[in-house]
Amino acid sequence: MGSRRKGRILAFQGMFSYEMNPAQTDVLAFNWLEDERKNTYDEQTLVFASLLLKGTLDHVQEIDGIIRSHLEHWDFSRLNKVDLAVLRISVYSLLYQREIPSTVTINEAISISKLYGTDESYRFINGVLDSVKKSSSETKNA
């Protein structure tokens, strides 16, 4: 598994941890990871995960608004916490990490949701992210 995939998984886990306890202050330092496990990641993985997690947290209100606007027949407050964490880091990546192709971001989100989400998570996440991608493409081209 590549360092970026590992970084995305770490960022997802950090977002999930944040969602479960928003008052925690050490989420960016990965203090929620056991030292033994944290030491298995190379610097490149930790840096990418940190950038993704920090960027997502810095823009979480904006990201949540975008997610809300792309939910069809679903209430934001009812989102599964795993799905929400995946959506947040992925929407951040679609909006702010333009050097990463949107297809890569969406495929990575689907892979993570298949590992950690419900049986239906990947379909839901794919639909929301595809809608976000299309609307951000329309905005760029306008």
Image (tube, rainbow, N blue to C red):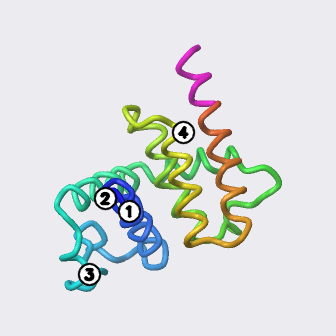
Residue 140 lies in the magenta-colored region: yes
Which residue appears farthest toward the front when viewing the image?
Answer: 1
Kindly identify the amino acid type of the residue bearing the numbered disc 3. Arg
Q: Position of residue 76 (x, y in %)?
A: 68, 60
Question: Looking at the image, do the residues carrying marks 1 and 3 touch, with CB atoms under 8 Å apart?
Answer: no
Which residue appears farthest toward the top when viewing the image?
Answer: 142
Mark 3 vs mark 2, foreground winner is 3
Mark 1 vs mark 4, foreground winner is 4
Q: Quadrant of the C terminus?
A: top right
Question: Looking at the image, do the residues carrying marks 1 and 2 touch, with CB atoms under 8 Å apart?
Answer: yes
**Which circle marks residue 103 in the picture?**
4
Residue drawn at (58%, 63%) of the image: 84
Question: Looking at the image, do the residues carrying marks 1 and 4 touch, with CB atoms under 8 Å apart?
Answer: no
Q: Secondary structure at mark 4?
A: helix
**Which circle marks residue 49 in the picture?**
2
Q: Name the residue that disc number 3 marks.
A: 37
Kindly identify the amino acid type of the residue bearing the numbered disc 1. Ala
Residue 124 lies in the magenta-colored region: no
Q: Position of residue 41 (x, y in %)?
A: 23, 69
Q: Secondary structure at mark 2?
A: helix
25 left or right, relative to 8: left
Residue drawn at (52%, 63%) of the image: 112
**Which circle marks residue 80 in the picture?**
none
Mark 2 vs mark 4, foreground winner is 4
Q: Could you give the CA–CA distance between mark 1 and mark 3, rounded to whole angstroms?
A: 15 Å
Q: On screen, 11 above or below 92? A: below
Q: Secondary structure at mark 1?
A: helix
Q: Secondary structure at mark 3?
A: helix
Q: Which secondary structure class fits the magenta region best?
A: helix
What segment carries the magenta color?
135-142
Of pointers 3 and 4, the one earlier in the residue sequence: 3
